[in-house]
Amino acid sequence: MSDCALAPAIVDFRRAFLVNLTSSIGGVATRFLLGLLLARLLQPAELGLYAVAATMFGIAQLLRDAGVSAYLQREPELTAQRFSACLGLMASTTVVMTLALLVLAEPLARQFAQPGLAALLQVMALGLPLSAFGGVMAALQLRELAAARIAFVSRVGTLGHAAVALLLTAEGCGAQGLAWAQVANVCICGLAYACLPSGRSWRPSWRGWSEVLRFGLRALFVSLLSGLNGALPDLWLGRFGSAYLVGLLGRTQAVVGLLQAVSGHALSFGALPMLARQHANCQSLEPALRHATALLTGLGWPLLALTVAHREALLGLLYGPAWVECTPAVLPLALMTALGLVFAQLNAALAAIGRPELAALPIGVTLAARLVLGAALFDGSLLSFAWALFGAAAVALPVQLWLAARHLDQSPRALGAALGGSLLATLAVLAVPLVFAPIACVAAMRWSRHPLLDEALQFVRRRMTSRK
């Protein structure tokens, strides 16, 4: 008998989604305002240096996790013995990665010719042990779809991070202030999770690792590839370009992914445990994946189109004249993001059916293509590198289509049907002046019977019912 089975069917997933969506909007808004202020307090090179350090810290976190978080979310019967094995494995990897980050800080700084990088990595390494506890607690909350608890921790962590970052950068600490803000965020989230009930014995065990590692290492391989794939732009520009270009790329990515971060984070909430439960009940995942794809692209594609169409005015309004060099890179990065929304839940679906290693195929293709196209196209400008990133995403598209059809029963025709309404809404917002874009978008979705309208209507009805 399990100590903690997967979230039961009676869980109101729609309520959990709405709570998470509200939290996501608040978190993105806070980080967006913080980005606006930091863009005026720091130089692009300082933001770029921190971005390189944060990328390396993120890779260390992935190695430290060793796939434990995915195992905690997916395992149908999480017994006390299995949980203790997860804790023992996490404790061991945390010690190893913390020491490795401290020892390798100086060599990495010399390799990237960035003397200030070592100090940033050494500061951020201090938060690695406490983030291990936060990672375990976050996985348990996701397993239970405890959206309200996750939202609370995210809110206090984000506010604490913003307060420390603004205080230290205003005092002239530069990128070092952002590193200490990251440590503060980890500490605050860890303390907040410590206040939540877990109902478990937190006694690590050095036995029973084999079962966790059988799934965890496959998930870790995919996570590590994904982390390297996400880290490559910053690391590439940091090594062969400059910290200044890394800073420009970060601001461009922030503009392109601003509103998509809200929808994407919310719609991926609880994806792994929910899909795993459907698979355990012998239900096809294709309807849920098709629905999620339609919602993601219906929200994201029109917003991306408007971002591209008004990129100059948007960048000038948000970040000021110091960041106008970001403008040319908006189009290729927006196209890359649009492709990413189509298969946003592919990794979670493959993990849910017990084949997380399959997700390594498109990620590995993307990573290799980024290396090849980056070397071939990069001429020292941000625009050339942005087109290399889009080209790599396009190269991986056939692999993603094959995986979806072969292992998830999602044929290209079914996927095309899910994208039709989103494409029509995107074309509609581009065909009219900005002031009429919302009306055109809704009309196109109404004509194509886009599921996003049904979700919006259910949201309104729920709000009206809750007020009564």
Image (tube, helix red, strand yellow):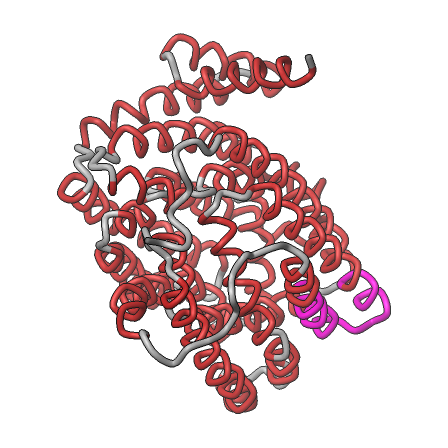
| Image side of residue 199 versus residue 374, left or right | right
Measured from the top left, where is residue 158 in percent x and y? Answer: 69, 54
Residue drawn at the location 43% of the way across and 59% of the way down: 385
Name the image quarter holding residue 41: bottom right
Q: Does 173 appear in magenta?
A: yes
Stretch in magenta: 165-185
| Res. 44 visible in picture | no
The count of marks equals 0
Most prominent secondary structure in the magenta stretch? helix
| Image side of residue 176 versus residue 280, left or right | right
Residue drawn at the location 58% of the way across and 70% of the way down: 243
- Residue nearer the viewer, 201 or 187: 201
Q: Does 396 appear in magenta?
A: no
- Residue nearer the viewer, 17 or 104: 17
Instruction: Work out which quarter of the rendered image holds the C terminus and state it.
Output: top right
Name the image quarter holding residue 335: top left
Up/down of 367 relative to 126, above or below:
above
Measured from the top left, where is residue 407 in percent x and y? Answer: 16, 44
Measured from the top left, where is residue 220 in percent x and y? Answer: 34, 66
Question: Residue farthest to the front?
Answer: 1
Up/down of 264 relative to 10, above or below:
below
Measured from the top left, where is residue 377 in percent x and y? Answer: 35, 61
Name the image quarter holding residue 190: bottom right
Question: Residue farthest to the right?
Answer: 171
Up/down of 309 relative to 117, above or below:
above
| Res. 266 visible in picture | yes
Residue drawn at the location 52% of the way across and 47% of the way down: 328
Residue drawn at the location 26% of the way across and 49% of the way down: 350
